[in-house]
């Protein structure tokens, strides 16, 4: 696909990026379809704004103040959209397989540049890749496709934009923000639209990602397509998806609204704005995929799939965190439920855990075996300390990676304890298990334990890690 063509007006991107639009504009677009009014006029309507608040909820009503600006009603806006394949998990949400640069101007959209990241100019890179990428992927440059190396979407977006500008790509100097979308978005959208057929292929919510991956990885060759044409089916597919969403968005507006809010909360849609004011609002709502500040304890586990195909979709994770006085132990149990085939292989991950600044690593184990401390990397980012190492897990295996470290002074005191557990962008199918032992008996906790566990100095809690979680314990 030619990635440097003359901008051309198209309608299909409205739903290609419906996940971005229906949260900010879903309400008034539904009215637009029915009343045949312009979005600009609808935005000025007190009635419509009240209806949007009613649909979205008072707790999200402050976003109405930035809708016109985000969608280019006040002045033209340009966004870089990244399609994050979280079946190949990367720190910033997933491998950047495709991208699109979009221009918004009073409800009109233009594609400035789009395509597979393998086709983007090699000048969109850096000569200094992270050491682990150079070692495990055998690359001598840090490419655009690997630019989301930070688990903080704002940091990753800044690096992605830097690479995009390096290659003199279309619209690079005009970009106002970055939007990341994972594969879960397509699956969840199709739970609402139902199955449909594209180019003789039936897509369902259960098979959509697998079939699209097969088409762009293998089937294109059987169809006589060139390598640079292999992702053309994505446009055809998204056009069909658009038609289905447009056909029932008013009927299912509540479902689309709830889905959008869930996808944002669960970090399957993340947004970064270069406007400080807009970024503050996104951060306030926890929609920016940032590593948040924490005055107490902190935990973020990050996996980076390195040359393990799309194996993340068959990895089940259990995250165990325990503290005993000032010593913390964090363990991730990986269960590889797949096999060797065209889509999955042994799981290869550069796993890192982010913890409070000044934490001191004491030991590490993998599969029950002690890891030589020389094989453990460490550093600081976003005001956090991190430890990391490379692991390999065969199909059918269960293995546990463990880090033991000393918490810094101040995390634990005699009055209360707080813990912020953040979910990696795009990492799903994770259960969290807490076993926290304190020197004093607990007087209250939020969330509360089961009642039969009250009255001692131990806090035990288990839940799915579908979103960022905060815990507060008082003594």
Image (spheres, helix red, strand yellow):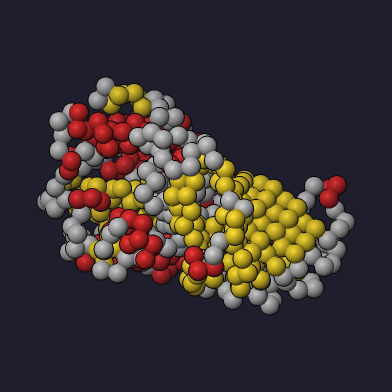
> Between 427 and 343, which is closer to the camera in this rendering?
343
Q: Is residue 443 left or right of residue 281?
A: right
Tell me where residue 286 appears, x and y as whole percent: 52, 58
Specify whether residue 134 is in view.
yes
| Residue at the far right in the pictured view | 455
Query: In percent of the image, x 57 and y 47: which residue is there?
Result: 399
Along the horizontal axis of the image, is 306 left or right of 284?
left
Q: Which residue occupies the foreground of this view, 274 or 246?
A: 274
The picture quadrant where one finds residue 65 is bottom left
Q: Nearer the viewer, residue 382 or 49?
A: 382
Q: Residue furthest left?
A: 6
* Viewer can see residue 34: no
What residue appears at the point 25 percent right and 54 percent down from the top-left corner? Answer: 101
Q: Residue 325 vs residue 367: left or right?
A: right
| Residue drawn at point x = 82 percent, y = 68 percent | 439
What is the total number of numbered labels drawn onto the structure image?
0
Of residues 326 and 152, the one drawn nearer to the viewer in this rendering: 326
Who's the residue at 79% across and 65% down the image? Answer: 438
């Amino acid at each position: 696909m030619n990635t440097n063509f003359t901008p051309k007006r198209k309608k299909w991107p409205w739903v290609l990026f419906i996940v971005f639009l229906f949260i900010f504009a879903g309400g008034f677009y539904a009215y637009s379809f029915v009343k045949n009014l312009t979005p600009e006029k609808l935005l000025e309507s007190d009635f419509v704004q009240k209806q949007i608040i009613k649909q979205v909820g008072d707790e999200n009503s402050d976003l109405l103040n930035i809708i016109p600006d985000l969608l280019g009603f006040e002045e033209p806006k340009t966004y870089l959209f990244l399609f994050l394949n979280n079946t190949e998990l990367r720190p910033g949400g997933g491998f950047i397989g495709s991208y699109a640069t979009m221009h918004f101007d009073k409800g009109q959209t233009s594609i400035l540049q789009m395509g597979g990241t393998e086709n983007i100019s090699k000048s969109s890179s850096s000569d200094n890749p992270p050491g682990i990428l150079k070692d495990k992927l055998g690359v001598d440059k840090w490419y655009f496709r690997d630019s989301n190396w930070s688990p903080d979407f704002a940091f990753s977006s800044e690096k992605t934009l830097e690479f995009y500008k390096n290659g003199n790509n279309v619209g690079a100097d005009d970009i106002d923000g970055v939007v990341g979308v994972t594969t879960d978005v397509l699956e969840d959208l199709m739970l609402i639209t139902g199955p449909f057929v594209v180019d003789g292929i039936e897509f369902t919510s259960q098979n959509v990602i697998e079939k699209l991956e097969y088409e762009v990885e293998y089937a294109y060759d059987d169809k006589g397509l060139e390598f640079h044409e292999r992702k053309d089916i994505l446009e055809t597919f998204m056009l069909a998806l658009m038609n289905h969403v447009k056909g029932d968005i008013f009927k299912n507006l509540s479902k689309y609204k709830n889905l959008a809010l869930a996808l944002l909360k669960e970090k399957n849609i993340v947004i970064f704005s270069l406007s400080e004011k807009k970024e503050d609002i996104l951060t306030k709502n926890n929609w920016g995929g940032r590593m948040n500040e924490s005055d107490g304890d902190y935990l973020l586990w990050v996996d980076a799939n390195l040359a393990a195909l799309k194996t993340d979709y068959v990895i089940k994770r259990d995250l165990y965190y325990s503290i005993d006085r000032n010593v913390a132990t964090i363990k991730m149990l990986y269960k590889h439920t797949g096999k060797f085939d065209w889509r999955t292989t042994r799981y290869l991950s550069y796993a890192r855990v982010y913890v409070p600044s000044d934490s001191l690593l004491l030991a590490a184990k993998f599969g029950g075996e002690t890891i030589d401390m020389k094989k453990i990397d460490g550093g600081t980012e976003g005001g956090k300390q991190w430890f990391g190492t490379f692991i390999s897990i065969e199909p059918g295996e269960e293995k546990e990676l463990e880090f033991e470290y000393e918490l810094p002074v101040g995390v634990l005191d005699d009055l209360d304890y707080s813990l912020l557990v953040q979910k990696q962008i795009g990492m799903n199918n994770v259960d969290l298990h807490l076993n926290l032992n304190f020197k004093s008996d607990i007087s209250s906790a939020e969330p509360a334990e089961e009642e039969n566990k009250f009255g001692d100095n131990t806090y035990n809690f288990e839940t799915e890690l579908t979103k960022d979680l905060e815990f507060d314990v008082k003594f």
